[in-house]
Image (spheres, rainbow, N blue to C red):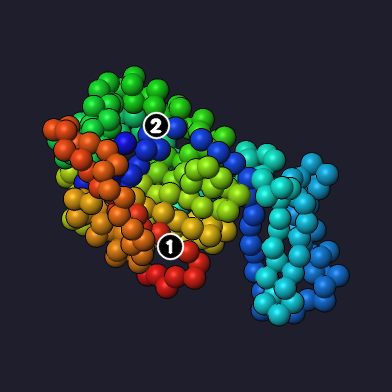
Amino acid sequence: MACAMPWSGRDHSWQSDRVGRNTTQTTPDTAYPKESGRELVRAVLLFVFGPLDKCPLLSYTCDLRTREWRIFMADNQLQYATLCPMFEELRGTRIVLRPYTLADAEARYQANDESRDHLRPWEPEQADAFHTLDETRDWIIRASANWLLRKRFSMGMWHLETQRYLGGLGLHPREPDGWAIPAFSIGYWVRVSEQGHGYVTEAVRLLTTYVFTSLGAQRIEITCDARNTRSIAVAERVGFVQEGRLRNVWRYADGTLADELVYALTPADAWK
């Protein structure tokens, strides 16, 4: 198991995982009577999911003091994970995040090729992958399948104005029952020629906001090689809290043992 890339938390989304969930939605700042509120939520669910007898819904309740609706899935599991909505594109100030398509194969290949020496200390498997366009296309097809199955979300990071490919991020439910909490892990990397511009920090902040607000996350985690100062700096700039150090979790190519740092955010944390 390797860890963060240069500028990175682990992004093993380029390899391939589990499912169920619980979401939270807050109503506008008006107090609905309980019954009319139920009808409103039912109407919204009908619009989003279709007939409710085909929806994995178990129940929904409202705290009238906070006007917070909680929608619970059967047995805390999403019966049809593929029906869970996911973004098509996230736009920040300078960057855009979106799933890969086959048209991205050339850019993905070139970025990995220029960055092999910088990736190797942290992600030796990725450093030794993507040697041909066909290998890259095969990876994109597999990544797209995992996205559709809601197992793992591999996304590219592009410059908003120039559309230059900058690097990649990975989001996946934290094993073993990430969707049931919900809890997720984020990984990231940037091509060597685009280091030092703050793109990864912006991307991680953008993705973290989405995961909390749209997926109802109760925990988001980043694990970093303890020597990877760039990766650590990204997590800390976004406001992730260091929770611990895992000692001797894998070996470098020279045989020496490596430690990992665990960073996390929960809804209770103040973050940037």
- Name of the residue lying farthest toward the right: 35
Determine whether the residue tagged by mark 2 lies in a helix, strand or loop: loop
Q: How many marks?
A: 2
Question: Which residue is drawn at the image coordinates 64% and 54% (left, top)?
Answer: 22
Calculate the distance from the C-alpha at mark 2 to the C-alpha at mark 1. 24 Å
Q: Nearer the viewer, residue 234 or 226?
A: 226
Residue 94 visible? The answer is no
Marks 2 and 1: which is nearer the front?
A: 1
Residue 259 visible? The answer is yes
For the residue carrying disc 1, how many other residues have a C-alpha within 10 Å: few (<14), some (14-19), or many (20+)? many
Image check: 184 left or right of 157?
A: right
Quarter of the image for the N terminus: give it: top left
Question: Which residue is drawn at the image coordinates 68% and 39% (left, top)?
Answer: 80
Q: Is residue 199 above or below residue 67?
A: above
Q: Amino acid at mark 2?
A: Gln
Question: Which residue is drawn at the image coordinates 45% and 27% (left, top)?
Answer: 141
Tell me where residue 132 sits by quadrant.
top left
**For residue 15, which numbered disc appears in the image?**
2
Find residue 171 and report its horizontal and vertical position in percent: 44, 46
Tell me where residue 164 sits by quadrant.
top left
Image check: 171 left or right of 86?
A: left
Quarter of the image for the C terminus: give it: bottom left
Q: Amino acid at mark 1?
A: Leu
Image check: 120 left or right of 241?
A: left
Q: Nearer the viewer, residue 258 or 211?
A: 258
Q: Is residue 88 above or below residue 70?
A: above
Q: Nearer the viewer, residue 177 or 38?
A: 177
Tell me where residue 31 sits by quadrant.
bottom right
- Residue occupied by mark 1: 265
Determine whether the residue tagged by mark 1 lies in a helix, strand or loop: strand
